[in-house]
Image (cartoon, rainbow, N blue to C red):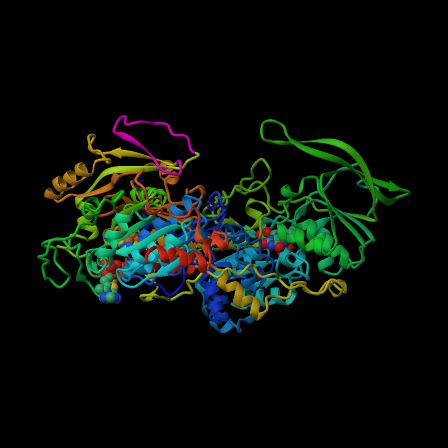
Amino acid sequence: MKPTDTSNPDYFHKVVDCQWACPAHTNVPEYIRLIAQGRYTDAYLLNRESNVFPGILGRVCDRPCEPACRRGRVEDKPVAICRLKRVAADLSDEVRDRLPQRPAGGNGKRIALVGAGCASLTVANDLLPLGYDVVIYEKLAETGGLMRSNIPRFRLPPAILDDEIDAIVDMGAELRLNSPVESMAALLDEGYDAIFVGSGAPQGKNLELPGRYDTDRIHIGIAWLESVAFDHIDSIGEKVLIIGGGNTAMDCCRSSLRLGGKDVRVMARKPRHLLKASDWELEDAEEERVEIMLNHSPEEFIVEDGKLVGMKFAKVEWHDDGSGRLKSTTIDEVVLPCDDVILAIGQENAFPWIERDLGLEFDQWDVPVVDPATFQSTREGVFFGGDSAFGPKNIIWAVEHGHQAAISIHKHCQGESMTERLPQTMNLSSTKMSIHEWSYSNDFDPAARRLMPHVDLKERFENLDIEVELGFTAEQTITEVERCLNCDIQTVFKAGLCIECDACIDICPVDCLTITHNGEEADLRSRLTAPAENLDQELYVSDGLPQTGRVMVKDENLCVHCGLCAERCPTAAWDMQKSELIIPYATDEAACPTKRKAG
Amino acid sequence: MSFIRKPKIVYKGQRTNALGLTRRDYEGGMSTLCAGCGHDSITTALVQAFFELDIEPHKVAKLSGIGCSSKTPAYFLDSAHGINAVHGRMPAVATGANAAARDLYYIGVSGDGDSLSIGLGQFAHAMRRNLQMLYVIENNGVYGLTKGQFSASADIGSKAKKGEVNEQRPIDPVKAALALGGSFVARAFSGDKEQLVPLLKAGIKHNGFAMIDVLSPCVTFNDHEDSTKSYAHTRQFYHPAVHADFIPPAQPIEAGGDEGGVLRVNLHDGSQLLLRKVAPDYDPHSRAGAYSYLDECEKRGEIVTGLLYIEEDRASMHEISQTAKQSLRDLEYDKLNPGAETLKALQSRYR
Ligand SMILES: Cc1cc2nc3c(=O)[nH]c(=O)nc-3n(C[C@H](O)[C@H](O)[C@H](O)COP(=O)(O)OP(=O)(O)OC[C@H]3O[C@@H](n4cnc5c(N)ncnc54)[C@H](O)[C@@H]3O)c2cc1C
Ligand SMILES: Cc1ncc(C[n+]2csc(CCOP(=O)(O)OP(=O)(O)O)c2C)c(N)n1
Ligand code: SF4
Ligand code: SF4
Ligand code: SF4
Ligand SMILES: [Mg+2]
């Protein structure tokens, strides 16, 4: 193999599994270290830089970082990254005085944002400090989008939303509530320099089965949750069936329990491992005694005398049809009694307010055609982001879309090429303090993952507003921060210094180092101290070593960043260096504008 | 040395041996040797060898004298037995221990100072008795522990760190062992575990005194230019002559006999060694041949390594002395202590 090119920032970035997996590339290990040092406000602000809503995301983020966390490969459970984010938010001081404001006077450019969800709010957050005039149009009477209208209050209290959203609006945005945009053509006529569509994927899917329209006790999940959130609905029948196996289904069943539901079941067509809901959402629902019934395919609503009395399901079995696709066969039929049914089978994009003759193309699924790098539509100056761009995802993706769209909007308004964007870069700095001292906590702590304490199972159902998760205690925090393996403290190797004494190889607690003759990747992977079987993880291959010409190979898979290789090395051929990924935002683009002007 | 211990991490997919133990179960305390010391590498090789041989750690006795090398038994097999003897006197203590408890594996770790300077007499007699043990000399050409004075293995012309030149003839433990009747004589290098680990395994299983001289650079006092025991010098003049593959008893063997330069040697317990030779006419059963080959290579400055001489069926100490077949602890009490009357009768035979 060729020597690894560590000057490409992606190489060391990829070693920081959590940061690599996070759509917004949140600097997880650094904020965990700040928490460990009691610097909660700094930890909060570091989070805010990339993910904008640490208090919200510290509660409800989809957390793609956690399944990626190295700790989950070394032992069973990843670091409780998301819970620690909440610790930073819970304990942070007021940060308003450390946030930028829109400069008085502004830069003379006007931007319209459609929707006050997390995508639009991120765009506002990034563009206001540059002096843009930002006008936010929101259909509803409140900000926040699905975060407020659909994520139940017992998971995400409104006060948290208000705090983080107001911080953005108060930078100087013009917020127009109760102002649905009903015509894109009309909006274009207003002469904005750019328009950002962050209107989400607002339509819940329907289920056309016999009996569907014979009763008013069948609800569309996201519409029902919105009615609950805004207090238009405050009760439900005792027997409730939720159709669907995703996170919306989990919010529907848990909300039902708080509105009078006694026998609440989630009816899923698929087996457990294929459910869309995250493991922790399933666990939380089951803790509340919701029964998750698998392999039940809905067939018919049973309505007697205009009253919904039950629902018929086919019990199915799944098997591979030979081409790798799953096919079901019916093995039985069952009827379950019910008072209400909630359909939670997915969302769709809908843009009835966008005329189709504006040069704004829609694809075969009636979804706008959007460039995945610039977020611009086929009409210049109109951008999409969040659920409206590529269908329903989650908050952190919407935030990342917002950051990228903000850069594009800025470049569009300044007449710069949108595709010539600042690259990500990386700084490396040694963490060595003395022979055996490093500026991070390098010892491996074998503690198991801490569990989130919950409000008592009786108390929590009293009303919708009781937040179930209590947040980590000080003791839990102290333990959990030490579980982080500091994956951003990189093992950096200088081949010219190595005398091939094997000290590093011998000390490595997870056998990830080898000195051997070079070869092709597959061959090399099989010849290491421990075979490198995780192909998603890179091999770090050195130049030829001075004495024998062999190479040092590190399998990045299990390294716990203990620094022992560097401590053991007599020549300091290994060093532990902190990698800091530098992610460009709209402000950075604004700080060096001329370099990449179009043409 | 390091201020944090090597953490014990049971990671997914970690290999276990026939006893269900991981390599980590064969480790010992945290090393306090200098970072990069060859001795630490040999420690790791010993861990690997015992792990691969599926030996229960408590069936092993570790012995040593004084020196950096002699400290290393503290760093492997922490559930084995151990005695740290006085300088150069480990062979006597090993002889006593082995006489009493013959069912343990004995592993002695010594240095060039400990064995060739102060302990040369003891070393010679243990070999002469063919005491059943693996005897490792961690050879760095200096007294590491007392800050780098030349030892008896320092080569003529080799320079000390501060510049003085050694003028005295070295004692080569391999040649000494050949001359003193050693039954298993090998040389290896701490920087080549592919060669060292199988040699250690063979030595552990050899029925008699297995002496392995392991070149083990002292990074602190003897790894400079003009030292003949540095990593760089050893690598430059490294000449592996006989490579030993260790085949445990249960495993079938493909190649056999003395074909294509591969010689098969049967060990006492049913395991086998496959010796691959660089010089096709090299005969590891010939003491004189080994000696002259060493002489020849020495003239070219080459450092000959490998299993250089083996005599697999020479009687070991217990066989020569016709001692009890089991350890003394397993003898019935009246056999172990036949009583005052028997003692008197015995003594009267010498009056
Ligand atoms: C039940 C449920 C639970 C969820 N739970 C989680 C979770 O725990 N974690 C997570 O990360 N994600 C979760 N999601 C997904 C997440 O809420 C969305 O991916 C995210 O909110 C998308 O943000 P957005 O800004 O693109 O759109 P939205 O949040 O949908 O915001 C769009 C806004 O635009 C407004 N709007 C729409 N059309 C117009 C118009 N024409 N004029 C003016 N305003 C308009 C809407 O009223 C809304 O306020 C959940 C989704 C649902 C349905
Ligand atoms: C009876 C006695 N004499 C002298 C010493 C001092 N002494 C300690 S270690 C040592 C030499 C050790 O050299 P070696 O065996 O080569 O071990 P190394 O440290 O090089 O591994 C000496 C002379 C001693 N401890 N006891
Ligand atoms: S830091 Fe070094 S010694 Fe520690 S696990 Fe990683 S490679 Fe191994
Ligand atoms: S410890 Fe240092 S000198 Fe020794 S092999 Fe490792 S990198 Fe090379
Ligand atoms: S002084 Fe030499 S022999 Fe002793 S520990 Fe240090 S490097 Fe090893
Ligand atoms: Mg020595």
Taking depth in this image into account, of B256 and A568 the one nearest to the observer is: B256
Please give left or right for residue B28 compared with residue A253 in the image.
left
Provide residue B348's location: percent of width, then percent of height.
36, 57
Residue B35, quarter of the rendered image:
bottom left
Q: Is residue A351 visible?
A: yes
Residue range corresponding to the magenta coloring? B251-270
Q: Is residue A423 above or below residue B307?
A: below
For residue B252: magenta? yes
Please give left or right for residue A493 compared with residue A195 in the image.
left
Secondary structure of the magenta portion, mostly? loop
> What residue is at 71 percent from the left and 51 percent from the top?
A223
Q: Is residue A446 above or below residue A336?
A: below
Residue A435, quarter of the rendered image:
bottom left
Please give left or right for residue B85 compared with residue A549 in the image.
right
Q: How many marks?
A: 0
Residue B116, quarter of the rendered image:
bottom left
Provide residue A43's location: percent of width, then percent of height.
48, 67
Q: Is residue A19 visible?
A: no
Provide residue A30's location: percent of width, then percent of height.
44, 62
Taking depth in this image into account, of A457 and A523 the one nearest to the observer is: A523
> What residue is at 45 percent from the left and 58 percent from the top?
B341
Query: Hey, which residue is sitting farthest right in the picture?
Result: A305
For residue A288: magenta? no
Q: Quadrant of the N terminus of chain A?
A: top left
Taking depth in this image into account, of A144 and B334 the one nearest to the observer is: B334
Q: Quadrant of ligand 6?
A: bottom left
Provide residue B169's location: percent of width, then percent of height.
11, 53
